[in-house]
Image (cartoon, rainbow, N blue to C red):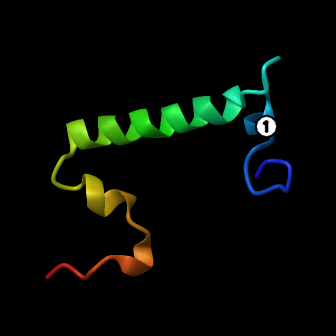
Protein backbone atom coordinates (compact mmCIF):
# COMPACT_ATOMS: atom_id res chain seq x y z
CA UNK A 1 0.00 0.00 0.00
CA UNK A 2 2.83 2.39 0.71
CA UNK A 3 4.27 1.81 -2.74
CA UNK A 4 0.99 2.95 -4.33
CA UNK A 5 0.78 5.93 -1.95
CA UNK A 6 -2.14 4.63 0.14
CA UNK A 7 -0.01 4.30 3.29
CA UNK A 8 2.87 6.27 4.79
CA UNK A 9 6.20 5.68 3.07
CA UNK A 10 7.93 4.35 6.20
CA UNK A 11 5.56 1.37 6.29
CA UNK A 12 7.35 -0.08 3.28
CA UNK A 13 10.64 -0.39 5.19
CA UNK A 14 11.71 -4.02 5.25
CA UNK A 15 14.42 -5.94 7.01
CA UNK A 16 16.84 -8.28 5.22
CA UNK A 17 14.30 -11.12 5.34
CA UNK A 18 11.62 -9.05 3.64
CA UNK A 19 9.47 -8.42 6.72
CA UNK A 20 7.77 -5.01 6.54
CA UNK A 21 8.69 -3.86 10.04
CA UNK A 22 7.43 -0.34 9.42
CA UNK A 23 3.92 -1.63 8.82
CA UNK A 24 4.12 -3.94 11.82
CA UNK A 25 5.19 -1.05 14.06
CA UNK A 26 2.35 1.14 12.80
CA UNK A 27 -0.19 -1.64 13.36
CA UNK A 28 1.13 -2.25 16.88
CA UNK A 29 0.95 1.47 17.69
CA UNK A 30 -2.66 1.72 16.51
CA UNK A 31 -3.57 -1.39 18.51
CA UNK A 32 -1.98 0.05 21.65
CA UNK A 33 -3.86 3.30 21.11
CA UNK A 34 -7.10 1.31 20.97
CA UNK A 35 -6.25 -0.52 24.19
CA UNK A 36 -5.41 2.75 25.94
CA UNK A 37 -8.61 4.37 24.70
CA UNK A 38 -10.65 1.43 25.94
CA UNK A 39 -8.89 1.59 29.31
CA UNK A 40 -9.40 5.31 29.92
CA UNK A 41 -12.86 5.82 28.38
CA UNK A 42 -14.48 2.38 28.04
CA UNK A 43 -18.02 3.74 27.57
CA UNK A 44 -17.03 6.02 24.68
CA UNK A 45 -14.18 4.09 23.06
CA UNK A 46 -16.33 2.60 20.30
CA UNK A 47 -18.13 5.87 19.57
CA UNK A 48 -14.82 7.73 19.38
CA UNK A 49 -13.36 5.40 16.77
CA UNK A 50 -16.41 5.21 14.50
CA UNK A 51 -16.48 7.49 11.45
CA UNK A 52 -18.69 10.55 11.93
CA UNK A 53 -21.32 9.72 9.25
CA UNK A 54 -22.16 6.39 10.93
CA UNK A 55 -22.68 7.84 14.40
CA UNK A 56 -26.22 8.02 15.68
CA UNK A 57 -27.54 11.24 17.14
CA UNK A 58 -27.62 11.37 20.91
CA UNK A 59 -30.69 12.88 22.54
Q: Quadrant of residue 26?
A: top right
- The residue to which callout 1 is attached is 12
Please say if 17 is above or below 45.
above
Q: Quadrant of residue 18?
A: top right
Q: Quadrant of the C terminus?
A: bottom left
Residue 3 percent location from the top left of the image: 85, 49
Query: Which residue shows up at 73% across the image and 37% down it?
Result: 11
Q: Is residue 10 left or right of residue 34?
A: right
Query: Which residue shows up at 82% across the image and 55% down it?
Result: 5
Residue 16 percent location from the top left of the image: 82, 17
Query: Which residue shows up at 27% across the image and 52% down it?
Result: 45
Q: Is residue 15 left or right of residue 39?
A: right
Please say if 16 is above or below 3.
above
Residue 43 percent location from the top left of the image: 16, 53
Query: Which residue shows up at 32% across the image and 76% down it?
Result: 55
Q: Is residue 59 left or right of residue 50?
A: left
Please say if 47 is above or below 53.
above
Residue 50 percent location from the top left of the image: 38, 65
Amino acid sequence: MSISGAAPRFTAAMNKRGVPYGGILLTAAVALLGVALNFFVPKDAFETTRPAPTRSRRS
